[in-house]
Image (cartoon, rainbow, N blue to C red):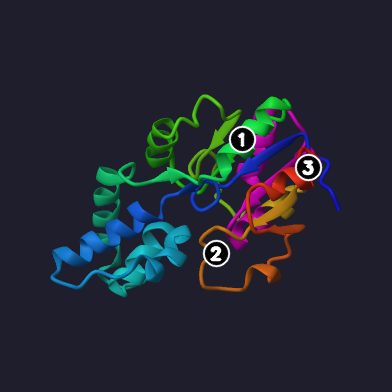
Amino acid sequence: MRIAARAVLFDLDGTLIDSAPDLAGTGNDMRAARGLPLLPLDQLRPMVGAGARGMVGRALGVAPGQAEFEALRDEFLQRYEARMTRETRVFEAIGPVLVALASRQRPWGIVTNKVTRYTEPIVRALGLAEAAAVVVCGDTTPHAKPHPAPLLEAARRIGLEPGECVYVGDDLRDVQAGRAAGMATVAAAWGYLGDGEPIDGWGADHVIAEPGELLNLLSLA
């Protein structure tokens, strides 16, 4: 079934951009500072979507609520800010999709739980800031995903009804937020996915393996 959408909203990390090398690299920087061996990227990558919480948990085995978590989280964020554009890149297969959307006058935007402090420098560095119709960050509204507020705000800023938008993301929270906002949802199987429920159980309207499949769903291929 095709999607009738006038705009496309994307999650950032794991959907539009591959930030795993810098997020996981920060986790390994913290391990190295403590004399611990580095972990391979494939062990850290699934938790990238959970940000500092996921990286501190996977890299150092410390979870929220434990006494040392907040200090480690703050250290992680400080280290990450210093290197967050070093290796992060737009997924290669996403580029042609964004070009196709622009050529067909389909606005696209970004809705991420990453806060503005980190999102804006990354989006600028990767050349996405001017092309995106809207960028909604984790601190733009009082609530972050899976609450629908960020997606509703993105639709409002674009000037469309939520039902005229489709949301693409690589985390269960993305699907939950999209559905709560009344948007069609697409789960991005090339993303980080986490270590929870398998992607086919998220309840997305569509699951796609490659970014180009989105153009088929939108009848733009």
Marks 2 and 3: which is nearer the front?
3
How far apart are labels 2 and 1 at the CA level?
Answer: 22 Å
Magenta span includes 157:
yes
Q: CA distance from mark 2 to mark 3?
A: 23 Å
Q: Nearer the viewer, mark 2 or mark 1?
A: 1
**Residue 98, numbered circle:** 1
Q: In the picture shown, does residue 41 fall above or below 122?
A: below
Q: Splitting the image into 4 quarters, where does residue 26 fall?
A: bottom left
Q: Are marks 2 and 1 in contact (CB under 8 Å)?
A: no
Kindly tell me whether residue 204 is visible in this rendering.
yes
**Mark drawn on residue 218:** 3
Which residues are the magenta region? 148-177
Residue 35, above or below 19:
below
Q: Residue at x 36, y 71 (%)?
A: 58
Residue 211 drawn at (x, y percent): 63, 49
Q: Nearer the viewer, residue 131 or 80?
A: 131
User: Which residue lies under the disc numbered 2?
Assistant: 193
Q: Secondary structure at mark 1?
A: helix
From the image, give the main secondary structure of the stretch colored magenta: helix
* Left or right, residue 152 beside residue 49: right
Q: Is residue 106 left or right of residue 77?
A: right
Toward which corner of the image does residue 23 lie, by quadrant?
bottom left
The stretch drawn in magenta includes residue 205: no
Neighbour tally class for label 2: few under 14, some 14-19, many 20 plus, Cα within 10 Å: many
Q: Position of residue 213 (x, y in %)?
A: 70, 50
Q: Are marks 2 and 3 in contact (CB under 8 Å)?
A: no
Whether 210 is drawn above or below 203: the answer is above
